[in-house]
Image: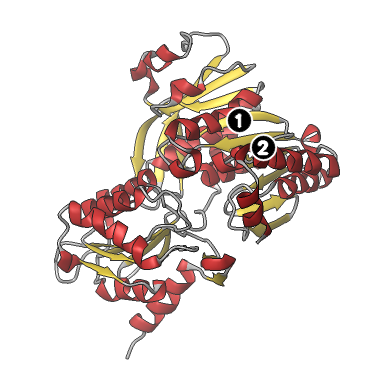
Amino acid sequence: MLKELIKKIFPDFLLSWYHLLLALIGAIIYRFPSCQTMVIGITGTNGKSTTVEMAAKILEEAGYKVACLSSIKFKYGEKEFPNSLRMTMPGRLTVQKFLRQAVNSHCQYAVLEVTSEGIKQHRHRFIKFKTAVLTNLTPEHIEAHGGFENYRRAKTELFQLTKGIQIVNLDDENAAYFLDFSARQKWGYGVNLSALDGEIFSEAKHLKFADKNWKVVSATDVKTSPLETSFVVNNLPFSLKLGGGFNVYNALAAIAVGLSEGVELKTCQAGLKKINGLPGRLEEVIAEPFRVFVDYAFTPNALDKVYATLRQNFGQVLPSAENKEPKMICVLGACGGGRDKWKRPVLGAIAAKYCDRIIITNEDPYDEDPVQILSMIKAGMVDAGYPAANFYEILDRREAIKKALNLATPADTVIITGKGCEPSICLAGGKQIPWDDRQTVREEATAILRPA
């Protein structure tokens, strides 16, 4: 492939100039479209796609025409289609083309996911961002960036470039690092923020809640389940048809986007209420006689939160006919291509902490040996003392899902992670095979549950 050849031939500094030149060419070809619409960039480790969807829905509820680009979909004007590129933030020409299409469709706003890899390759350059949003930050893409500090530094580039509005998750331990950049307006969000008493700002040049350009969105009375979430902002109740406490933070980020654009809080409430779940994000595929969820989680932080959400709500699942303790049955893998090998045993250890039965399976091996990937996940489970009788190694992902469904009995919960609504499995040599975890679940469940 041409891309691989270029990587092998050119040193890193020349590759950087190559990516920057492509970004400039894209902006020139499409006539610097970001100057004709208001661009909101959302970055972080987890929750970017969901926050994009929520922010777009709030702005649409306020009467604006909105374009959005996420790992889930492309949308501009009345046109909407899935993101099948397998890239959360597409290449420079694609992003600039998308923004031109947004302008041509008379969209006043464009909401984009901005990734660290995209920033590293200058995909964000020559885009005029009005607003920068941080969802959260945990270790990810460590090998690609040469360490967590470089990964975090890449994320801050969006904030360095954005002088209009900056929005930061104040409950994230890296918040102070992102508060040290000048902007016309700063927003913070979190849960029960009054308890912080401004301590989060101690490393950020003494910024305090009392500073004139600071505004804060705080949630109280948070209640969560696998399918619904509720909380209160300024005495106004919010109800989401999305599960997990992590979605409270995604919603608060989106609310801050809306409020920073002059949208009323009640309009934010109405917009979020219209979201009826998101593809592959803690999506319930089967409701009975057992429950099956599919989720995109592939980082340790995200996986832990998804498992915790399901485990904490076992009391709300269907009652067992045998009056037995419900089980959580987990199907997981890890991405190949040499990416973040460090986290494979970590994912295994997290699964061992929460899951009663574990099936480790193929995900996106790219050019790596899938058996080796599974052995690294297994090592984390073994180190955590997980009983060998309770886990299975099944390379074929369909067979792994089938095994999970066969293990499930009434009241059990099956959770399949790592791909969400991704439309393919990536193999060696750039080959992709069509795939959908949700469709596979439906097909196998139909065969298993069909009356004899």
Percent coordinates x, y for residue 13 in the rendering: 64, 36
Q: Are marks 1 and 2 in contact (CB under 8 Å)?
A: yes
- Residue at image coords 46%, 8%: 206
Of 329 and 56, nearer the camera is 329
| Residue at 35% in and 67% down | 371
Crowdedness of circle 2 by 10 Å Cα count: few (<14), some, many (20+)?
Answer: many
Residue 359: quarter of image? bottom left
| Quadrant assignment, res 96 | top right
Residue 376, position as x, y percentages in the image = 31, 57
Tag shown at residue 104: none
Q: What residue did someone put label 1 on?
A: 158
Q: 198 left or right of 94? A: left
- Of labels 1 and 2, earlier in sequence is 2
For the C terminus, the quadrant is bottom left
Separation (CA) of disc 1 from disc 2: 8 Å
Judged from the image, the secondary structure of the residue bearing numbered disc 1 is helix
Q: Amino acid at mark 2?
A: His
Q: Residue at x 33, y 19 (%)?
A: 195
Three-letter residue code for mark 1: Leu
User: How dense is the environment of label 1, judged by Cα within 10 Å: few (below 14), some, or many (20 and up)?
Assistant: many
Question: Where's residue 101, x and y in %?
Answer: 79, 48
Image position of 228 (left or right of 17): left
* Residue found 62% across the figure and 35% down from its top: 41
* Residue 417 found in image quarter: bottom left
In this rendering, would 31 be left or right of 341? Answer: right
Tell me if residue 204 can be seen: yes
Element type where label 2 sits in the image: loop
For the question of whether residue 314 can be seen, the reply is no
Q: Which mark is residue 124?
A: 2
Locate the N terminus by quadrant: bottom right
